[in-house]
Image: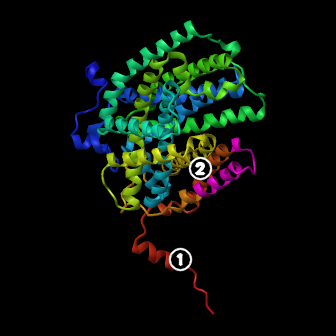
Amino acid sequence: MSLREKFRGPTTSIDEQIESYAIDRVPASKRWPIPAISLVLLGNATAMFFFSFGAQQTFLVGWPWLLAPIGYFFLGAIGIGMLTMRMASREGLSQNLLSRGLGFGSRGAAVTSFIYAINYIYYFLFEGTIVSHAISYQFGIEVGSAGGIAIFALVGLATLALVWRGMHAMSFLQAWGFPLFLILLAYALWRLGTAHEPVGPSGWHATGEVGWAAMWSAFSFANGQMIFQGLMATDYGRFAAQRIRYRGTAAIMLGELIPMFAVIFLGVFLGASLLTELGPGGQSQAQDPGFMFVHTMGFAGVLFVLVTQIRINVMNLYSGSVALASGFDVAAHFRPGRPWWMFLVWFVGVIFYAVNVIDSLGTFLAITGVLTNTWVLIILADYFICRRLLGLARREQIEFREHEVRAWNPCGLTSLGVAVLVGALGIVGIYPIYYASFAAMLLGPVLHVAITVATRGRFYRVPTKKDSSQEAADTPVIER
């Protein structure tokens, strides 16, 4: 295989490129080389969100304490990504399809598909909002005005058109977009060093008291991202070779995380430098990449934010459409085609932008951390413990078609419901919110394994007449 071929996917039809096996297995002949998958994931690794993430960690706990939650994020994402990607590549299935056989059932998995899709709608909104902020700061257009909404909508539609052909389109965009990202980032750092006052680690201070609450808040923020990055990589890892080893999946994760953490630490550097310049009242702007780069670079900052937003939002639109296609396929037997679900992601994103949902970022991250983290760890526990370790169901060729699985598997759904309820108690203030995602994600998989073992894996199988007769025979008759 030539060097060029290592960074390209296999030859496929236009229909296959567009649908991207959203509701079926990826055939063994259509798998991608590791470098080609890593190239696609570069778009996520260099998202504007991670500049903001780095700045927020600095303002929460400062240097060197920020190394603890960031290190937890890095090591945890590698571990979760290795496991989820190995599982998805073996089966050639997205997490949404895997969930049908791994503890949730076909209709139960539709619920998790919608949970997953909401994540991408919000991240699409977040990245698009950064572009609107950049244009607002440069040209004086109000973020919440009709003009601001129109800019968000039009940029979103342009991004949608660019990713119509799925993985192949994203591979092309990242191949050309990443060098442009590096050039503009280098210019931003040069401008910071020549026209502003850069601040080193000795000036990376928290803006409040660094105590137990601040540290746990930083870990909670990192916790949601740790699970989500491993989960997101799986959407692309299902295209990896079927017999890929853990070192292969670790290589894909490192290929994504190393540039991602470079961006996070640049966010620390840029945020602290701008806060020193703007003063205590400038924290909100210092952690907003839309302001960060326009203030540093002027109009070139608008271009930088726009290019970077397109590179990540093609991934948000793609993954959101895969999740929705899987969910509606079983919930309503509605199959308009994967690309058309991108319009729903875009439309809901525009509505959320217009009503300023982005102001509730903290609450959103807490809720999705509880829901998404618990779901992911339940299916990992099902695959690696219930199936592969305990042998309660088959280890290969996981069932996912409607006739192969129950509509509702109470094992996963009950575990998810109880764990989410416990997490919700933290979100509403019964206990500190920064414990919520940890409590839910630890309780969910433990409950799932216990219930599945107690029922001896009975809910993996579709009930037959023989099963019904046996259940009736096992039911004691009470004589009056």
Displayed quadrant of residue 467? bottom left
Displayed quadrant of residue 15? top left
Q: Which residue is mark 2?
A: 445
SS assignment for the magenta stretch, majority = helix
**On screen, 384 above or below 476?**
above
Q: Earlier in the sequence, mark 2 or mark 1?
A: 2
Q: Which residue is mark 1?
A: 474
Is residue 409 visible to the viewer in this orientation of the structure?
yes
Comparing 281 with 254, the one in front is 281
2 and 1 marks in contact (CB < 8 Å): no
Q: Nearer the viewer, mark 2 or mark 1?
A: 2
Q: Residue 213 at what x, y percent from top left? A: 76, 35
Look at 46% across and 37% down and name the residue there: 147
Q: Residue 212 at what x, y percent from top left? A: 77, 33
Look at 53% across and 77% down and name the residue there: 474
Comparing 43 with 394, the one in front is 43
Task: Specify start and end residues of the magenta stretch as a single range.
Answer: 415-435
